[in-house]
Amino acid sequence: MGSPSHKGSEYLPPPPPTIPPNVVPIQSGKVAAPAPKRLPMARRNHGTKGTPMTLLTNHFEVRMRQTEGYFCHYSVALFYEDGHPVDGKGIGRKILDKVHETYSHELEGKHFAYDGEKSLFTLGSFQRKKLEFTIVVEDLSSNRTARNDSPGGDGSPSEGDRKRMRRPSRSKVIRVEISYAAKIPMQAIANALRGQETEHFQEAMRVLDIILRQNAANQGCLLVRQSFFHNNPRNFADLGGGVMGCRGFHSSFRATQSGLSLNMDVSTTMIVKPGTVVNFLLANQNVREPHQIDWNKAKRVLKNLRINTNHSNTEYKITGLSDLPCNQQTFSFKQKSGHNGDGDAIEITVYEYFVNNRHIKLEYSADFPCINVGKPKRASYIPLELCTLVSLQRYTKALSNQQRASLVEKSRQKPQERMGALTEAMKRNNYGADQMLRSFGVSIGSQFTQVEGRTLPAPRLKVGNGEDFFPRGGRWNFNNKKLVEPMQIKWWAIVNFSARCDIRSLCNNLIRCGEMKGMHINNPHEVFEESNQFRREAAPIRVERMFEIIKKKLPWPPQLLLCILPERKNSDIYGPWKRKNLSEAGIVTQCIAPTKVNDQYITNVLLKINAKLGGMNSLLTVEHSRSIPLVSKPVTMILGMDVSHGSPGRSDLPSIAAVVSSRQWPSISRYRASVRTQSPKVEMIANLFKPGSETEDYGIIRELFVDFYSTSGKRKPENIIIFRDGVSESQFNQVLNIELDQIIEASKFLDEKWSPKFTVIVAQKNHHTKFFQSGRPENVPPGTVVDKGVCHPRNNDFYLCAHAGMIGTSRPTHYHVLQDEIGFSADDLQELVHSLSYVYQRSTTAVSVVAPICYAHLAAAQMSQFIKFDEMSDTSSSHNAMTSAGSIPVPELPVLHERVCNSMFFC
């Protein structure tokens, strides 16, 4: 939520961050970085609670015959004859392959691992520090101009129509420089496996990963970071809109307690559907005829895609479209005459050239733009119907809701299917025959690693009428049960933006189901139906018109406005409606788009409404009895932190940072959210501590500290447990030394003598470790925890699969305990994390990651809907939009109304 508003003239950007006392100023020309104050903690012990079980995991044993030598890192530079650098994706591998083939003796017979860009690695060094080679390569670039098959170069195709003997050669002379950069001791891997800190470990692992990428590249795969995708139609799934899901495999080397392993998993990416360009555009824009295509949209989506020309079987990269249709787009064409072929230049259309000069029949290209494969000042045009999109081209734009749902559905695999696919992939990759791995002394096993796991029992839950029960299989229901703290709804109304909803039946079902759950719901005071005349207006106008009617009919704000949306999931009403209610009117609102109304649907809606109004649906019994170790007795606050980024391809949208905190201690089921915008794609949360003066802090954490204090009997937390989502292992030190520092500063700003203890836990869902039951087709049971075998050899981490995997293969959450001043045992902490997966008020299932992180994600997602940032003006934010000193200002979110800011509005 936005910080309190101030007068623009008084609101200044925050001062630059305080320089820690141990930082030495960097001298000009030198680069230095202070050692981090805090490092991730080492594991103290392993958990023992739960039912033991033997599992298999998708890690494969890796052995290294030698660990005493060095990987040598060389930088690679490629130049044309004239000294200009060679650029172009994918070209480097072709050049270095030619170097290895031509200069094997000069390379001392060594094999090398090349990353495709500027780094090359060998086992041991070359005798010379710098090597230079000259090679000749054919057809270097896939974006060739001045060819005989298209009007190009200076605009004249006739150059290519001259005698064949006069056509210029397309061979290129390339100068290759390989220069020594650094030594990477192989011992770093052995040291890391023994749990020792080593600065070269990540670099050594990168070398091994590059070898696997090179192996995949040699097979013609599409490479996406550590995943690779074969050009096999069996792996493709149509998602609609000219987009396909492509199934491939992820591979990465991991250091574990059992030694070095290769983590292999099934992976999916999106690719452009191969085929004719016109068919792709029809599907992409969901139109039936070519004349319906929006060519401005087409130009954006086609740029940089690769095509193959039907008439010459040549590959190009699309640089744009012609300004005019094929039968109007002209260029200067030199006619043949005389013995030397020279002639006068005439203006001719692209259509005339291909039909009359190339004798190619064009059926539908005449009235549509041509594909431009030339350079900015040297266009080269090809008629639309002669162009076919090549396979394995990534589609990086945002998917529609329908495409995303289709991708999830079609990429699911049951556990045994996934194991079979991985076993087959390991056979096909045949790493045992890879010359690089063999020369580096690396061998990879083919069997899944066996690990020991445990199944934690589900925590006991408390519902209404003093009833306790144990969930079974990670699920429960409210059949014949009442909510533990039901709210009564006396003054409410319905707003209907949909023409298809049966309001009377919906009301009756809500009231009836509410009564069964202990919620007394009066009949709605009013039902507001949108007038037909407003339904074609823009969404913000429709919302404003509706509120004008609401204000006339309702003398004071209702407890609840139930909003019926016209479309499910992607209604443009949702954002403006939420903003109007939560920011301006201060009214709790629940949006629904019912398609199939039954008791289960109504119950799920009531669970959300009850939580938003301040009620509780269920509680942990140990929470109610104040018997959670190290949480219920010392005053304890729980934080969930997440940063949400804009969709792919939208780097202009601010990132949204959300932090939720527990309130009303000793409860760990009630939360409040604070949300801010920050610079795009920045993962570290910037405004946890934001001093505006010597006495004012406008940061996120102060807001949450004050709320916790006021709702917990005027007590400050002695312990603070932080759950952080969405950060990689390379960012752990930043969480400990930037974000935690801000939280500590915020606490000291409130009370210099206050020194709470912190436990910091990172939750990762974006990883590739899976667990399987040996010989059984179903997923691992909910509550499965693993802290041996495939965990970090030193750091304190564990995997927990709290939820019931009903379809597909369950993905456990990987929890990393970075700091634990509170002093949890492994069992107590694992049980706490497991229990926090059962306090999610929106559903009757255990969730896959702790509820505070789920809530932070929901809060960020909902607040991001408030505003379309690209349409914002300076006046649309609640106060002047500023960020940290030196960064680009970003628009701030509006402040939530005081009547709803402390609610679980995000439920």
Image (cartoon, rainbow, N blue to C red):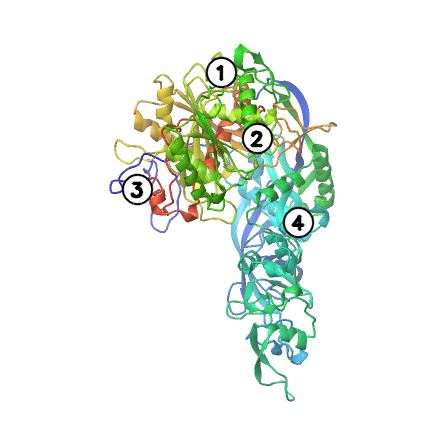
Residue 455 in the image: x percent, y percent? 63, 21
- Considering only order in the chain, which callout, 3 or 1, is on the residue closer to the N terminus? 3
As measured in the structure, the alpha-carbon distance from the residue carrying label 2 to the one carrying label 3 is: 38 Å
Residue 296 in the image: x percent, y percent? 53, 59
| Element type where label 3 sits in the image | loop
- Considering only order in the chain, which callout, 1 or 4, is on the residue closer to the N terminus? 4
As measured in the structure, the alpha-carbon distance from the residue carrying label 4 to the one carrying label 1 is: 52 Å
As measured in the structure, the alpha-carbon distance from the residue carrying label 4 to the one carrying label 2 is: 28 Å
The answer to whether marks 4 and 1 mark residues whose Cβ atoms lie closer than 8 Å is no
The answer to whether marks 4 and 3 mark residues whose Cβ atoms lie closer than 8 Å is no
Dot 1, how many residues are within 10 Å of its Cα: few (below 14), some (14-19), or many (20+)? many
Q: Name the residue under label 3.
A: 13
Dot 3, how many residues are within 10 Å of its Cα: few (below 14), some (14-19), or many (20+)? some
Q: Which of 539 and 102 is in front in this view?
A: 539
Tag 4: amino acid: Ala
Q: Could you say which disc has been placed on residue 623 in the image?
A: 1
Which residue lies at the image location 37% right of the left edge and 28% below the top edge?
555
| Element type where label 1 sits in the image | helix
- Considering only order in the chain, which callout, 3 or 2, is on the residue closer to the N terminus? 3
- Considering only order in the chain, which callout, 2 or 4, is on the residue closer to the N terminus? 4
Q: Nearer the observer, disc 2 or disc 1? A: 1
* Image-quadrant location for residue 553: top left
As measured in the structure, the alpha-carbon distance from the residue carrying label 1 to the one carrying label 3 is: 42 Å
- Considering only order in the chain, which callout, 3 or 4, is on the residue closer to the N terminus? 3
Q: Name the residue under label 2.
A: 813
Residue 633 in the image: x percent, y percent? 43, 14
Q: Nearer the observer, disc 4 or disc 3? A: 3
Q: Could you say which disc has been placed on residue 792 in the image?
A: none
User: Could you tell whether 840 is left or right of 660 in the image?
Assistant: right
Tag 2: amino acid: Thr
- The residue furthest bottom is 338
